[in-house]
Image: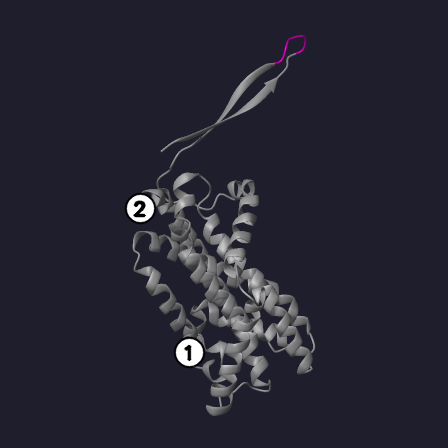
C-alpha cells in the first residue's frame, strides 16, 4: 500500500509572480530489517505525547483513587512480602529494614512488569487506529512504556517518604539512578515490542505474557531478598543475564546508599541493550503487516 500526501510550496522568482508547486511525500512499505527512524519519531513526538496521555486517562478513568493506584500497587505488595517473607520466612534484607528494602525493589519491578504487559497488549488494543491512519507503529508500545514511567515517578514519592521514616539519607550513588532507570526502560521496550508483535500474529500471547511476567518476578530474587549468597559460583554469572536482576539490585543500592555491583550492572545493562535492539528490529520488520492481520 502506498500513501501520498501533498502540501503547498510557494515559490517567487525575482520580477515574476508567485507560483504554487505541489510537494509530495510518498510512504511505501519496505521489506527487510529496519532500525528505529529517529527522525520520523521526532516528527511525530506530539503523537507520542497524546498516546501516552490517552493510556494514562484510560487506566484511571472512573476510578476513585486515580493515580494513587500507582502507589498502592507496590505498597500493598510490600506489606504482603514483609508479613510472609520478612517475618514468617525470615528472608534476609541485610542491614536494611525489610519494608524499605523490598519497596525499593518493587518500585522498579512494578514499572517494568506493567510496561512489558501494557506494551505487549498495546498494538492489539489500538486496532481501529492502526487500520485507518499511517503513523510509526512503534509509537504505540512506546506510549505504554511512557505511561508506566509516570506511575513510576508518582510511586517514587512513597520511596522518599519511607527513606525519611527510616532515616536513610541520599548518597552520591543516587546519581546512577537515571542510568539504571534508562536500562530498565530499554529492557521493557525491547521485551514489550517483541510481545506486541507476537500478540498480533498469535493471540495466545495475550494470555501467555502475564503469566511469564509473573514467573519473571520470582526469577528476579533481587526484588525480595538479599542476594549476597547468590553472588558466588555459577549464580553470579547466570543471574545478571536477567536484565531486571542486576538493574533492580543496583537501583536499590544507588538509592539507599549501598555499594554498586559493577559486574551485575554492566552485564544486565548490556543484556537490556541487546533486548531493546532485537525487540525493536523484529517489531519494525513485521509492522508493515499489522493492518492486514490485526
Q: Which mark is residue 93?
A: none
Whether residue 235 appears in this view of the structure is: yes
Which stretch did the figure color magenta?
14-18
Left or right relative to 80: residue 283: left
**Which residue occupies 46% across, 41% down?**
135
Residue at image mark 2: 293
Residue 179 spot, x, y in % from top left: 58, 63
Circle 1 — which element?
helix
Circle 2 — which element?
helix
**Which residue occupies 57% across, 70% down?**
71
Does residue 282 sit above or below 3 in this rendering? below
Residue 21 spot, x, y in % from top left: 54, 18
Residue at image mark 1: 235
Q: Quadrant of residue 43?
A: top right
Left or right relative to 26: residue 62: right
Does residue 190 sit above or below 211 in this rendering? above
- Which residue of the protein is positioned furthest toward the top in this rendering? 15
Residue 65 spot, x, y in % from top left: 57, 67
Dominant secondary structure (helix, strand or loop) of the stretch shown in magenta:
loop
Q: Could you give the CA–CA distance between mark 1 and mark 2, rounded to whole angstroms?
A: 42 Å
Q: Nearer the viewer, residue 264 or 79?
A: 79
Local packing at callout 1 (Cα closer than 10 Å; few below 14, some 14-19, many 20+) is few
Mark 1 or mark 2: whose residue is earlier in sequence: 1
Residue 219 spot, x, y in % from top left: 41, 75
Q: Nearer the viewer, residue 283 or 107?
A: 107
Does residue 272 sit above or below 226 in this rendering? above
| Eye-nearest disc, 1 or 2 | 2
**Which residue occupies 51% across, 40% down?**
40
Q: Does 268 lie within the magenta span?
A: no
Coloring scheme used? one colour
Amino acid at each position: 500500500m502506498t500513501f501520498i500526501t501533498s502540501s503547498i510550496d510557494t515559490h517567487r522568482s525575482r520580477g515574476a509572480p508567485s507560483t504554487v508547486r505541489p510537494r509530495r511525500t510518498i510512504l511505501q512499505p519496505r521489506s527487510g530489517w529496519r532500525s528505529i527512524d529517529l527522525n520520523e519519531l521526532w516528527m511525530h513526538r506530539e503523537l507520542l505525547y497524546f498516546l501516552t496521555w490517552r493510556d494514562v486517562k484510560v487506566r484511571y478513568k472512573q476510578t476513585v483513587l486515580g493515580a494513587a493506584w500507582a502507589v498502592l500497587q507496590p505498597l500493598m505488595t510490600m506489606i504482603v512480602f514483609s508479613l510472609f517473607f520478612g517475618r514468617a520466612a525470615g528472608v534476609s534484607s541485610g542491614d536494611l529494614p525489610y519494608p524499605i528494602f523490598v519497596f525499593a525493589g518493587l518500585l522498579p519491578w512494578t514499572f517494568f512488569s506493567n510496561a512489558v504487559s501494557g506494551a505487549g497488549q498495546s498494538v492489539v488494543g489500538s486496532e481501529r487506529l492502526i487500520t485507518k491512519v499511517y503513523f510509526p507503529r512503534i509509537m504505540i508500545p512506546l506510549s505504554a512504556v511512557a505511561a508506566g514511567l509516570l506511575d513510576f515517578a508518582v510511586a517514587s514519592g512513597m520511596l522518599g517518604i519511607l527513606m525519611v521514616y527510616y532515616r536513610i539519607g541520599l548518597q552520591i550513588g543516587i546519581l546512577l539512578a537515571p542510568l539504571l532507570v534508562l536500562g530498565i526502560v530499554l529492557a521493557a521496550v525491547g521485551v514489550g515490542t517483541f510481545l506486541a508483535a507476537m500478540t498480533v500474529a498469535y493471540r495466545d500471547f495475550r494470555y501467555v505474557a502475564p503469566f511469564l511476567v509473573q514467573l519473571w518476578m520470582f526469577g528476579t530474587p533481587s526484588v525480595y531478598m538479599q542476594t549476597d549468597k547468590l553472588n558466588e559460583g555459577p549464580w553470579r554469572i547466570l543471574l545478571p543475564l536477567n536484565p531486571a536482576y542486576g538493574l533492580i539490585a543496583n537501583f536499590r543500592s544507588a538509592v539507599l546508599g549501598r555499594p554498586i555491583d559493577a559486574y551485575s550492572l554492566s552485564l544486565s545493562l548490556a543484556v537490556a541493550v541487546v533486548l531493546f535492539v532485537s525487540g525493536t528490529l523484529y517489531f519494525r520488520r513485521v509492522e508493515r503487516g499489522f493492518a492486514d492481520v490485526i
